[in-house]
């Protein structure tokens, strides 16, 4: 089944404790992206990647890191999480390198709480 | 400010009625996409309309695009309780390279 998977689905952590949210897609998509969704602010892009070893900042990259060592994986790293990073996070992928020509496929989401 | 802004923010209708949601945007686009999100879940792509298209259909969905007014509408006909969800428009701007910009969504509630 074609899908985007994220792990963990739920995470409660404390300020400053490094964490990684994994994202994997099995559709051989070129483009991958991370979003955060907050009430009243909609969906905002954190980082995206158009190819292996190519990543770019989105609208809200501060406090986050990403890597794209393999085509299928695009982990999101919070080196020192803070309470303002409490949010619902989505990974997405798309067939085309630019990510905006075809539809994006979204993962199920990761609900992160930082205390 | 958001490139895509949906209107209304919330819509409540009875089963069987039609639901219309609108999206306005500010700059020229390559395409506009509509997504659906059930509470707390990932977004699901519904339909993509390109800037040179005016109308597209998919099942009970009808999307229109008016580039002169920089607006789009999503019509769901004969709504069902299962259509209850948030609906987002996303624009691919000519100047934004590879990104999609999402609006804040319309919360649709279909009452049985």
Image: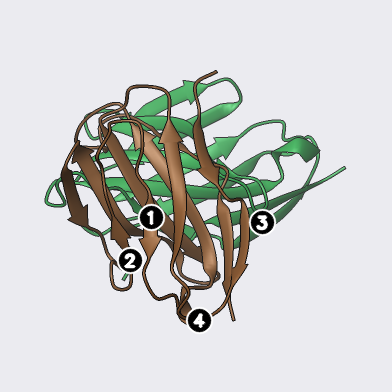
| Residue at the disc numbered 4 | A15
Callout 2 touching callout 1 (CB < 8 Å): yes
Q: Which is nearer the N-term, disc 2 or disc 1? A: 2
Instruction: Name, please, the residue furthest toward the right.
Output: B112
Give residue A9's mark. Answer: none
Q: CA distance from mark 2 to mark 1?
A: 7 Å
Which residue shows up at 70% across the image and 39% down it? Answer: B83
To which chain does the residue with label 2 belong? Answer: A
The answer to whether tags 2 and 4 share a subunit is yes
Instruction: Point out residue A71 in the picture as x, y percentages from the top left corner.
Output: 28, 31
Pointer 4 indicates a residue of which chain? A
Disc 1: CA contacts within 10 A as few (<14), some (14-19) or many (>=20): many
Mark whose residue sits in front, 2 or 4: 4
The residues bearing labels 2 and 4 have C-alpha atoms spaced at a distance of: 14 Å
Q: Which residue lies most toward the left here?
A: B95
* Tag of residue B11: 3
For residue B12, side relative to residue A71 (left or right): right
Q: Are marks 3 and 4 in contact (CB under 8 Å)?
A: no
Give me the disc on residue A64: 2
Chain A drawn colour: brown
């Amino acid at each position: 089944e074609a899908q985007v998977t994220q792990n963990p689905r739920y995470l409660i952590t404390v300020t400053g404790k490094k964490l990684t949210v994994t994202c994997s897609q099995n559709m051989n998509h070129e483009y991958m992206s991370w979003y955060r969704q907050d009430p009243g602010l909609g969906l905002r892009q954190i980082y995206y990647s158009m190819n292996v070893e190519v990543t770019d900042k989105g609208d809200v990259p501060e406090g986050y890191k990403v890597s794209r060592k393999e085509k299928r994986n695009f982990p999101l790293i919070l080196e020192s999480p803070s309470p303002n990073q409490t949010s619902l996070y989505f990974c997405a992928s798309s067939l085309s390198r630019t990510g905006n020509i075809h539809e994006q496929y979204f993962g199920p989401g990761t609900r992160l709480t930082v205390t | 400010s958001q490139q895509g802004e949906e209107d209304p923010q919330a819509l409540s209708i009875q089963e069987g009625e039609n639901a219309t949601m609108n999206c306005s945007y500010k700059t020229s686009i390559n395409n506009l996409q509509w997504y659906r999100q059930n509470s707390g879940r990932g977004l699901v792509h519904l339909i993509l309309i390109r800037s040179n298209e005016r109308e597209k259909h998919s099942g009970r969905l009808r999307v229109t695009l008016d580039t002169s007014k920089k607006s789009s509408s999503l019509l769901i006909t004969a709504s069902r309780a299962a259509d209850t969800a948030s609906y987002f428009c996303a624009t691919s701007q000519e100047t934004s390279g590879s990104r999609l910009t999402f609006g804040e969504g319309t919360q649709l509630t279909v009452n049985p």
